[in-house]
Image (tube, grey):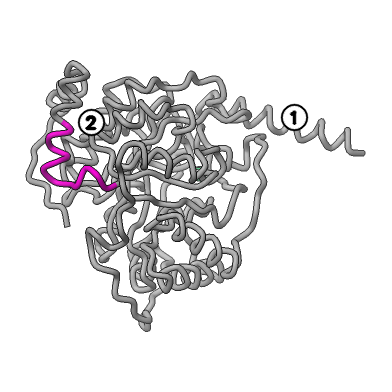
Amino acid sequence: MIENKNEWTLEKILAIYNTPLLELVYQAATIHREYHNPQEVQISTLLSIKTGGCPEDCAYCPQAARYFTNIETNDLLSKEVVREAAKRAKSFGSSRLCMGAAWRNVRDNEEFDHVIELVKTVNELGMEVCCTLGMVSESQAKRLADAGVYAYNHNLDTSEEYYTEIISTRGYEDRLKTLENVRKTNMTVCSGGIVGMGEAVEDRCKMLLTLSRLNPQPESVPINALVAVEGTPMEDQEPVSIWEMIRMVATARVVMPKSVIRLSAGRTNMSTEGQALCFMAGAGSIFAGDKLLTTPNPAIFEDLEMFDLLGLKPKKPFADAPKPKTKEMLDYQENRNEKWTRPGHIIEKNVQYSGLAKEKRKDNKVMGE
Ligand code: SF4
């Protein structure tokens, strides 16, 4: 577990973020070498096990049912499909399979029972299993841990203040509560955010401050560049520059020296040179696979070519923490009491895009008649 001995403040983090770029990269690279093997990069494969139809209103997300986006939805994948996907990912050097379901929160029902079976299936293949299923109660987190989940992902997305401009269907405190529930188990914590949603630099640094103050700090911190998807309220957002991504990776590296910083969504817009600087600045992991849930990602052979070029090698599974010991959870108490919030304030753009989606669906229906 990563102990948090640092007392970061917003001022200190802003000062790091605003350090002249090459100096910042140098400082971050120095810290990276102290705590990590800079030649190793962990490859995670993200698999959407249940796509679309989500009741939340996250402004960046094509899986939100209320927006009209061009994604193919699917119900929970079968064990066979997941096993094959995991085997394929492993054969390309992935040490971790991250299974994502477009849910607001986990419910104690047959779908959760099925996810537990999927976890066991991937675990048996000797891969690290990560899940990202929305909010989880303490008992649900324990059940996942006992089934063999190595990491649970739940991103903070941005600062607490800016969060209210992105999502109205749940509160920031729910994110933190979920991370707290995960931390009560032996699962590792994966939590980061998205850059390029129109937030200020201060919001990015506030998010890093919140993450850095988690005690212990998250083992894994994904840094995503927004992929603006047509039909979402963020569709017109300009892509974030590579220099901002490098600054964000480097700052995360400095404030959370032992965490694995994960270069996540948005890599299709990054050159190999840009990604190389991110690795130099402390990124120790990427998401691989042709798709990240629903958005495009570089093909795995392109990533392996980049690894060859840069002299990087994929990290082996369970290099940082032992394989979780699995056990049948005999005394599982269903969670009926966890109260998740629903602030319900008005985010004009989210409401506008939800209205547009309704009109488009109506038009499509008329055309189909
Ligand atoms: S980000 Fe997750 S919770 Fe938000 S709409 Fe998408 S799938 Fe749902």
Label 2 is placed on what type of residue?
Answer: Ala
Q: Give the farthest residue toward the right.
A: 369
Q: Residue at x 29, y 70 (%)?
A: 324
What is the number of the mark on residue 250? 2
x%, y% of residue 327? 34, 80
Q: Which residue is drawn at 41% across and 54% down?
A: 135
> Which quarter shows the C terminus?
top right
- Neighbours of disc 2 within 10 Å: few (<14), some (14-19), many (20+): many
Q: Residue at x 16, y 50 (%)?
A: 215
In the image, is residue 103 above or below residue 284?
below
Pick the front one: 121 or 278: 278
- State the residue position of label 1: 359
Mark 1 or mark 2: whose residue is earlier in sequence: 2
In the image, is residue 234 above or below residue 2?
above
> Which contiguous range is marked in magenta?
28-40
Label 1 is placed on what type of residue?
Answer: Glu
Separation of marks 1 and 2 at Cα, in angstroms: 44 Å
Q: Is residue 34 magenta?
A: yes
Q: Which residue is drawn at 43% across and 26% down?
A: 197
x%, y% of residue 154? 37, 49
Q: Picture quarter containing residue 247?
A: top left
Pick the front one: 151 or 105: 151
Pick the front one: 29 or 109: 29
Q: In this view, does 210 lie to the left or right of 342?
A: left
